[in-house]
Image (cartoon, rainbow, N blue to C red):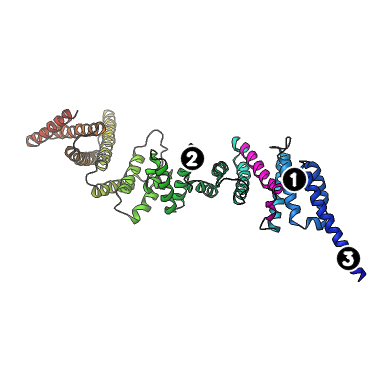
Amino acid sequence: MKKSILFTSICLACFLSDAQTYESIKTEVALTQYKKAKEDLDKAMSNVLFAGKPEAYILKATIYASLSMEDGNKNTTAGDQLANEGDAAFKKYKEMDPTMSLLSDILYQNGPINLYSNYYSSGYIDYSNKNWEPAFSKLIKAVNYSDLLIEKKIIAVSIDTNVLILAGITAEKSKHKDDAAGFYSRLADRRITGDGFESVYRFLVSHYFGKKDFISFEKYKSFGRQLYPNSEFFTFDKIDFAVGLETSLTGKIKAVEEVLTTDPNNYKANEWMGEIIYRAFYPLKEDVAEPFDSVAMEIKMIKAFKKAAAVQPDSIDAFLYLGDHFFNKSGNIYAQIEYQASDVKKREASGTMVSKEDIAKRDLLYKRNSEAMENQKIHYEKAAAIFAKRKNLGIREKAQYRNLAGKIADYYTFKKKQAKERPADVATFEAEEKKWNDKYESIK
């Protein structure tokens, strides 16, 4: 019986000793004697009874976090180490006390507050220096502490926009795209707007299109359109994004083909297909040329433009593109004709007779040129017929109409010269030539 009483007395003494130690260290914290508090805490942690309670870890988190924000430690390697140890201690506290009941103590609230402050300020410095990965790893912790402080009503805000936007940017820059979407969507779902926030909605629209999450794509595109009505970006549809997010010719064509597989009569998709291939044939200065099967691609391009014209017969663009393609093709073939004629002439001058192969090649080039010119004329005349039905043409439309009228007139001039030994044909071509020249002069 005496042994039992003695054991109980020893346990009670230990309990009272631990409780006194907690209070003693808390007093030091309250007096901002953090270094002394750390020394006493570190000693006490060797006591299994002391270290076996959740309070030991929230006390450690509070002390280490407070030290990390002191002058001389703040935003230094030493300060980062203190914060990381405080963070580990706070995680241990949450494991031991999932309700986090001790956060009702104002003194212990300084733990997560200072951990938030440390990770935010240190992360911001890395962000400013474009050290994206370290900044992201710190700011994601700042977000977690910010969420905790809001949840526990320790800070009186409903959302921390500053830390979320920084976490989103650093996640995006460090290639953690899904994390960036998570942070940005929290802002977008609250319809946060203002300077610098349009990029949030732009990112989400592009991100979810790439994920083929078209519900989220449409959702954030709608938000962006409402909040930034003057931004053209949020008027783009799936076809625009399908093409815009691809950088290679093959990728762009594949993206449009995916749309056409389920919607073959989609006018915009067919027009895009034609335009993509047209630009491959006639690249701009800034384009990076890619090898492609010109015969197969020409067939695909012509088919796409013709389909677009069939779906939307009053559209001029498809006919203009086709007319321009055959105009350019004719010019290229005519250059080959001139080159061959010059080559044959040189060989004849040196005594080499014209071969059957030379004649066959010449005849094929003339045939191909004639076909290209005929196709050019057909599509230009179709475009002209649409222009003729329209009223109040704009400056650009008048320029297009005048330009193709001149090209059609040139076609008939060429045909008239070819038919010089056929008077009836000459008269026909001359009449068409005059009609289109008159049209050219009438368009001002």
Give the CA separation, mark 1 to mark 3: 34 Å
Is-magenta flag for residue 119? yes
Relative placement, left or right, of 395 versus 171 is left
Relative placement, left or right, of 73 versus 419 is right
- What residue type is disc 3 on? Phe
Sequence-wise first label, 2 or 1 = 1
| Image quarter of residue 355 | top left
Q: Residue furthest right?
A: 2
- What residue type is disc 1 on? Ile
Sequence-wise first label, 1 or 3 = 3
2 or 1: mark nearer the eye: 1
- Disc ID at residue 7: 3
Q: Residues within 10 Å of mark 3 (few under 14, many from 20)?
A: few
- Disc ID at residue 197: 2
- The residue shown at (15%, 33%) is 436
In the rendered view of the protein, which quadrant contains the N terminus? bottom right
Sequence-wise first label, 2 or 3 = 3
Q: What residue is shown with label 1? A: 63
Q: Main secondary structure of the magenta part?
A: helix
Is-magenta flag for residue 254? no
- Which residues lie in the magenta part? 100-125
Helix, strand or loop status at disc 3:
helix
- Disc ID at residue 302: none
- The residue shown at (12%, 33%) is 435
Q: Residues within 10 Å of mark 1 (few under 14, many from 20)?
A: many
Q: Position of residue 398 (x, y in %)?
A: 22, 32
Q: Position of residue 32 (x, y in %)?
A: 76, 41
1 or 3: mark nearer the eye: 3
Give the CA separation, mark 2 to mark 1: 37 Å
Relative placement, left or right, of 167 versus 109 is left
131 relative to 217, above or below: above
